[in-house]
Image (cartoon, rainbow, N blue to C red):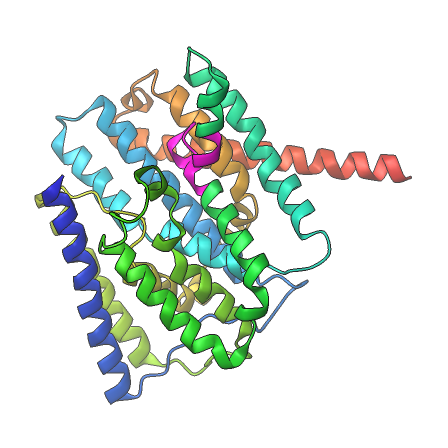
Amino acid sequence: MFQKDVCNMEWELLGIILAGLASLTHYFFKIPVDFPSPSNLKDNREIRFDILRGFAMIGIVMIHIHSYFQFFHPKDHLVIHSTLFLSNISRFSVPIFILTSAIFLKKKSGYWKSKLNHLVLPYFIFSIFGYLIKYQNYSFSEFTFFFLFGKVFTPFYFVPLLIQFYILFYVLNSVFIRETWNFWILLLSFVINLVSNLGYLDPILPNVYHSISIFNYLFFFVLGISIVQRKSSVQNSNQNTNFILFVFFLVVVVLMILFSYLLEIDFKNHHLFYPIFMMMFVWIHLHNFRPKIAKILSYIGNHSLYIFLLHPFIIHFMHSFDPYIFGGPILGYIITLLLNVGLPVLISSIVQKGKILYQSHHFS
């Protein structure tokens, strides 16, 4: 455990070094950066951020698939190292999802009603079903504890985490929207996030709170709010930008291979620099996506809540059978991914269409 903590700390420090090199390169070579900005809104919702959410949602599922394969084939080292590599390279997912969640936040009439109906209530219902399915000796106090800290299924921790950010946004909205304070708030959140990532807040915070600590992701949430406040983005990125990002992407991939195949390190979700780099890399190359792929990713991003809530049930039931039954490790991985993303999206689509039909019939 100590070795893994040290390696995670070294990875964070390595991110600081890489970010420093990127900043120096940007400064000396005057390379423009096309940083995301919701300047071209479509119905008040930027579709490119939905594409990022789609990427993030698939990545979150890939993180959990690794543990599924490891459960059945811990000694199949090549397969496990490969799924670990895919898991590690997907570690940008939770920070990016929090960032995009902040981008879509607006303090308006019905703020809490919307959050209760579309997040808290579904989470409560799925937590009840999950608790009844996964556990045997039922206890109201235990369920309450699991519900508050997102422990019915491991991925459920994200909902209490997100609710804390919604509360933070509601309480401090007037502070966040002050343009003159924007830089300093962003800088403060960065320092707090970095201190938390390096483990200095762990002795202060209760152990039970570590998994849902907002300090681990605070910078990404504030960055999302900051992006909304920006009036426009630089639109003149050139070949040098793409080249530098591509070089850094290769460096990251090589490091991921090293950590995954040789050191067997399973990274955490809340590193600072890798998610930012991946967001910019994907953002700059979004125009290269085929329209159908972009539409699919956007659709997944729009139905992400159902993936969060239903995917844990699917992966839980899948622990009853070996993933290799689908035709070996490669096909098994692909089919597992399709099931854990596709089934929740399908159910979400049916529910949404049912709501539309009900509303049209009810008000006609």
**Frontmost residue, 59 versus 172:** 172
> In which quarter of the view is residue 35 placed?
bottom left
* Residue placed furthest toward the right: 364
User: Which residue occupies 44% across, 26% down?
Assistant: 314
Whether 352 is among the magenta residues is no
Q: Left of 197 or right of it: where is 36?
A: right
User: Which residue occupies 72% across, 51% down?
Assistant: 110
> In which quarter of the view is residue 289 placed?
bottom left
Residue 248 locus on image (x, y percent):
22, 67
Query: In this picture, which residue range is highlighted in magenta?
Result: 146-158
**Frontmost residue, 285 versus 95:** 95
Whether 152 is among the magenta residues is yes
From the image, which quarter does the C terminus lie in? top right
Q: Left of 72 or right of it: where is 304?
A: right
Magenta: main secondary structure: helix
User: Which residue occupies 59% across, 69% down?
Assistant: 174
